[in-house]
Each structure stands twice: as structure tokens, then as C-alpha cells.
Image (spheres, rainbow, N blue to C red):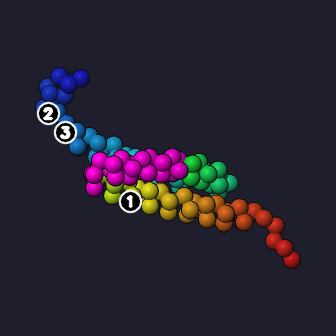
Amino acid sequence: MLSMLILAGGGAVSPVVFQFAIFILAIFVGYYVVWSVTPALHTPLMAVTNAISSVIVVGALIAVAAGVGSGSGISTWAGAVAAALCAVNIFGGFLVTQRMLAMYKKKQK
């Protein structure tokens, strides 16, 4: 495959360009997947998202603990930022899920 690419006039692709192309494709795929979700599926998907974020919080706390023990400031700060962002995502997800479930409750007269 590489020989065909070189014969076609192109060189090897930089890993940064390759990873950036994958990142851009993931943005487009994510956008179309999220906007095509029906409202009935929103609550179960938010529950899964909250579960994934809680696993990420555990990893962030491990990064903070590893940075404190070794004296590495970058690991500590990156882990703290990741934990804070995941906490915002989790609590925001719970609030949105609560509002979605309230939409399906019968209104009291």
C-alpha cells in the first residue's frame, strides 16, 4: 500500500495530520449521531454518559494521586481539571435527565 502511495506521487502522511483527520471525522460523526437521537432515547443515553463520566472521574483521581506522590505538577493539575470537568458533566447530566423525566409526568390539576 505504501509503495502505491509513493508511486502515486505522495509521501508518507504525518501522524499529526492523520490523527487530526480522525479527530475531524469524529466531530462530524458525533454531531450527526447526537442530533438524530429521538427524545425518547435521551434519558437512557444520558444515564450511560453519566456512567462513563464516573469512570473517567476515577481515572482523573488516580492521576491526581499519582502526581501528588511523585511531585509532578502537570499530572496533578491535569487530573484536577479532568475531575472538575467530569463532575460538571455528571451533575449536568443528572439535571437534564431529571427535566426530561419531568416532561413525562402527568400534570396535577
Q: Which residue is rendered at x = 51% and y = 46% of the image?
A: 55
Q: Which residue is rendered at x = 81% and y = 71% of the image?
A: 107
How many numbered marks, from 0 up? 3
Q: CA distance from mark 3 to mark 1?
A: 30 Å
Quadrant for residue 106, please give it.
bottom right
Tell me which segment is drawn in magenta: 52-73
Camera-side residue: 27 or 3? 27
**Among the two numbered marks 1 and 2 on one chain, the one whose residue lies closer to the N terminus:** 2
**Disc 2: which residue:** 11
Residue found at the far right of this picture: 109
Camera-side residue: 1 or 49? 49
Answer with left or right where residue 102 lies relative to residue 49: right
**Disc 1: which residue:** 81
Answer with left or right where residue 87 lies relative to residue 47: left
The answer to whether residue 5 is visible is yes
Q: Which residue is rendered at x = 59% and y = 54% of the image?
A: 46
Q: Where the N terminus falls, by quadrant?
A: top left
Q: Which mark is residue 94?
A: none
Is the residue marked by circle 1 packed among few (<14), some (14-19), or many (20+) residues within 10 Å? some
**Among the two numbered marks 3 and 1 on one chain, the one whose residue lies closer to the N terminus:** 3
Quadrant for residue 12, please give it.
top left
Camera-side residue: 79 or 91? 79
